[in-house]
Image (cartoon, rainbow, N blue to C red):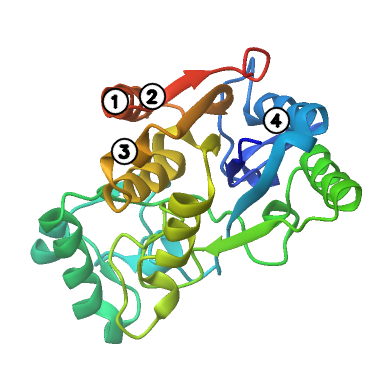
């Protein structure tokens, strides 16, 4: 029997809307958001659960004090940067923005320099989201229920993969931080997960939030450490992913790049 693994990226409340409450970093538009993606995914897990050998679920897991949160930054007037404001290395060199904590200023300048040197995403100030222990950190209720039912029915365990708790680096990718911290093994390349997928999975279903950021970075990092033949195992469930608004091109570019490398695309209704 074909061994199918499901990788679901950050199916958490803070990227969704629940009743009238909207998550801190809502992914989607006024008409449709990540909650619709997650509901489709939950129905998919309930429908095809017997065909899933393993489920790997990543969890964005931040503290309020994080390099991509406004409270960590200031300018000469004591102001914090606005949400979604990019911060370039040149901004730190010029003194436009600097770390609120003087002891972190050299580290922040080095961090933004490393991002640019290695062609990672520019540092962006995000709303505080997926704060550990908060409502926003939890899985969306329907997905959580589907995962619990799957574990009870098939006597299997979800492989939960936390990311983002190191305050000094962003962690879009579930398998490595944007700038690994030598003092923190959780920011280094997760070779255990990559090897597990390479050796044990015949097909790897990809889903999650947001396509433009955490899905793209996770899958690209796995692919770059995976071997080109293994990339053919990837299947993106297109109807269970959305882009962060205004970052749609990042998601489109990811899909184009990875399909050229061998990734397939389908929907939850058409997968077989």
Q: Residue at x 50, y 37 (%)?
A: 210
Q: Judge whether 41 appears above or below 3 on screen.
A: above
Residue 203 is situated, as x and y percent measured from the top left of the image, at 52, 36
Residue 174 is situated, as x and y percent measured from the top left of the image, at 46, 55
Q: Quadrant of residue 177?
A: bottom left
Q: Quadrant of residue 251?
A: top left
Residue occupied by mark 4: 41
Residue occupied by mark 3: 229
Residue occupied by mark 1: 253
Whole-angstrom CA distance, mark 3 to mark 1, is 21 Å
Residue occupied by mark 2: 248
Whole-angstrom CA distance, mark 2 to mark 3, is 28 Å
Q: Judge whether 17 appears above or below 74 on screen.
A: above
The secondary element bearing badge 4 is classed as helix
**Is the residue marked by circle 1 packed among few (<14), some (14-19), or many (20+) residues within 10 Å?**
few
Tell me which label, 3 or 1, sits earlier in the chain.
3
Residue 64 is situated, as x and y percent measured from the top left of the image, at 55, 67
Whole-angstrom CA distance, mark 2 to mark 4, is 21 Å
The quadrant of the rendering that contains the C terminus is: top right
Q: Residue at x 46, y 66 (%)?
A: 192
Badge 4 vs badge 3, beta-carbon distance below 8 Å: no
Tell me which label, 2 or 4, sits earlier in the chain.
4
Whole-angstrom CA distance, mark 2 to mark 1, is 9 Å
Q: Judge whether 66 appears above or below 201 on screen.
A: below
Of the two numbered discs 3 and 1 in the rendering, the one whose residue sits closer to the viewer: 3
Of the two numbered discs 4 and 1 in the rendering, the one whose residue sits closer to the viewer: 4
Of the two numbered discs 4 and 3 in the rendering, the one whose residue sits closer to the viewer: 3
């Amino acid at each position: 029997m074909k061994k199918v693994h499901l990788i679901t990226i950050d199916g958490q409340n803070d990227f969704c809307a629940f009743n009238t409450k909207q998550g801190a970093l809502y992914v989607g538009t006024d008409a449709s958001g990540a909650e619709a993606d997650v509901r489709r995914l939950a129905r998919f897990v309930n429908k095809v659960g017997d065909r899933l050998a393993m489920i790997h679920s990543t969890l964005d897991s931040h503290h309020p004090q994080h390099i991509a949160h406004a409270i960590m930054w200031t300018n000469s007037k004591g102001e914090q940067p606005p949400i979604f404001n990019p911060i370039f290395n040149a901004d730190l060199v010029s003194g436009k923005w600097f770390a609120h904590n003087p002891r972190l200023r050299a580290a922040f300048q080095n961090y933004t320099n490393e991002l640019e040197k290695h062609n990672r995403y520019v540092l962006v100030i995000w709303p505080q989201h997926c704060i550990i222990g908060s409502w926003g950190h939890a899985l969306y209720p329907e997905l959580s229920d589907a995962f619990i039912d799957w574990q009870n029915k098939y006597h299997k365990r979800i492989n939960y993969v936390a990311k983002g708790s190191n305050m000094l680096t962003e962690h879009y990718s579930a398998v490595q931080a944007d700038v690994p911290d030598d003092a923190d093994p959780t920011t280094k390349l997760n070779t255990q997960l990559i090897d597990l997928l390479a050796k044990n999975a015949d097909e790897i279903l990809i889903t999650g939030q947001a396509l433009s950021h955490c899905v793209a970075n996770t899958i690209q990092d796995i692919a770059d450490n995976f071997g080109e033949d293994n990339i053919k195992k990837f299947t993106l469930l297109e109807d269970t992913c959305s882009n962060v608004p205004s970052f749609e091109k990042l998601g489109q570019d990811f899909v184009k790049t990875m399909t050229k490398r061998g990734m397939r695309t389908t929907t939850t209704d058409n997968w077989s």
